[in-house]
Amino acid sequence: MAEKLATLSFHDGKPSVDFPIYSGNEGPDVIDVRALYGKTGLFTYDPGFMSTASCRSSITYIDGDVGILQYRGYPIENLVETCSFLEVAYLILFGELPKKDQLDTFVDTITHHTMVHEQLSRFYNGFRRDAHPMAVMCGVVGALSAFYHDSIDINDARSREISAYRLIAKLPTITAMTYKYTTGQPFMYPRNNLSYVENFLYMTFGTPCEDWKPNPVLTRAMERILILHADHEQNASTSTVRLAGSTGANPFACISAGIAALWGPAHGGANEAVLKMLDYIGDVKNIPQFLERVKVKEDHTMLMGFGHRVYKNYDPRARIIQKTCHEVLEALDLKDDKLFKLAMALEKIALEDDYFIKRKLYPNVDFYSGIVYKALGIPVPMFTAIFALARTVGWIAQWNEMLGDADAKIGRPRQLFTGAARRDFVPMGQRK
């Protein structure tokens, strides 16, 4: 029973209506308007769901006003400095940090599920070599349901667990194979003696021609990127996974739907846009002119990688990845590279400009992650594919949570209809 009520009053003499208010452990209270239509015949109107809580969730908490991101209550800053990606994945999936034996078992399970069905590797031949990696990812991940029939019963807890393990284990392999296919290089099979992140880097950059050895700086950089992108509350792609899941769709189809949503340049494609912007600016001397264009609204020039829809303060992930970015550039001796000098100069100038300071347009995680990917030698079209690899953990946890929520229903938003009112049909010969 809600302790507080919100009262909706009308100016036309209709009686007021009360709605319960519920409080979460953190964040704003919510008004339960599920009975609104039944009591009043009205809908709410909230384009973009800016003021609508679509579900209950205990996974990720964000306070955009002060710049807080927590997984299961743990600040992202603590997790990224001390945990491996799989340790964070366990936390997101099961709600608690694992003990050593639990983590060992989890890592062993994931490690021994990294191979994909050999017929799935032939699936790639159906795509053009110049296909966008996200197009390939959508198709291949969706096709997993055709290979693993034994784990698509969404009403069986064990099936859901197996599908979760398979998705987390196989996404690095699928992502690396996508890269190899677009470059014309042979696929590299996973190696069980490597860590999760090392394995991904090996399958991406290794070749049969020579031995591949992990670079600890680059491995840790990728580990941090994956952790920072593992979940981010009810964003567009997560909401898409939940919406698809609400229909009873199998987990592989739901994750494929999430990948499709992530592909959009306003969501997962933002770090691609950062590199395209830097390429457009071209030279440090052009930065002032570019920033002046950004300030003119009618010009429609965007400063990509700055600001965030949720974070109205500094993106907490950006502080972490900024440090990682500089470590990578140092390790690869790229401090004097023209592109990276341009990026660092843009960051410095924008952070000192009153226009951007007043609007709290600080660099976000996309600004730095795109630079790190580029430094690692990852082509721009692959950026969002790696984002999908990381976010799969969060999608699975959110999907599983939704299936266990007694209040969850098939997603079915309503609308404010602005089309033609009912009118009489006019036969062809009488139309003017």
Image: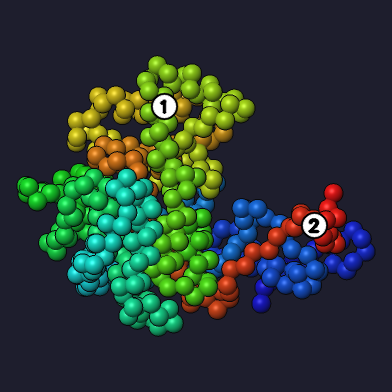
Please identify the quarter of the rendering in which residue 156 is found.
Answer: bottom left
Q: Going from the N terminus, do you reach mark 1 or mark 2 first?
A: 1
Furthest residue in direction bottom, as rendered? 156
- Is 61 on the left-hand or right-hand side of 108? right
Please identify the quarter of the rendering in which residue 280 is found.
Answer: top left
Q: Nearer the viewer, mark 1 or mark 2?
A: 2
Question: In the rendered image, is residue 111 in sight?
Answer: yes
Identified at 42% across, 18% down, the residue is: 286
Q: Which residue is mark 1?
A: 280
Q: In the rendered view, would you say 205 is above or below 390?
A: above
Label total for image: 2
x, y percent for residue 221 = 26, 46
Please identify the quarter of the rendering in which residue 113 is found.
Answer: bottom left
Q: Tell me the element at label 2.
A: helix
Could you tell me which quadrant the N terminus lies in?
bottom right
- Is 386 on the left-hand or right-hand side of 295? left
x, y percent for residue 230 = 37, 57
Q: Which residue is mark 2?
A: 428
Q: Tell me the element at label 1.
A: helix
x, y percent for residue 32 = 67, 68
Q: Residues within 10 Å of mark 2 (few under 14, many from 20)?
A: few
x, y percent for residue 282 = 38, 23
Q: Look at label 2 and name its amino acid.
A: Met
Q: Look at label 1 and name its amino acid.
A: Tyr
> Between marks 1 and 2, how big is the CA–CA gap?
53 Å
Q: In the rendered view, would you say 363 is above or below 406?
A: above
Q: In the rendered view, would you say 361 is above or below 70?
A: above
Identified at 38% across, 77% down, the residue is: 152
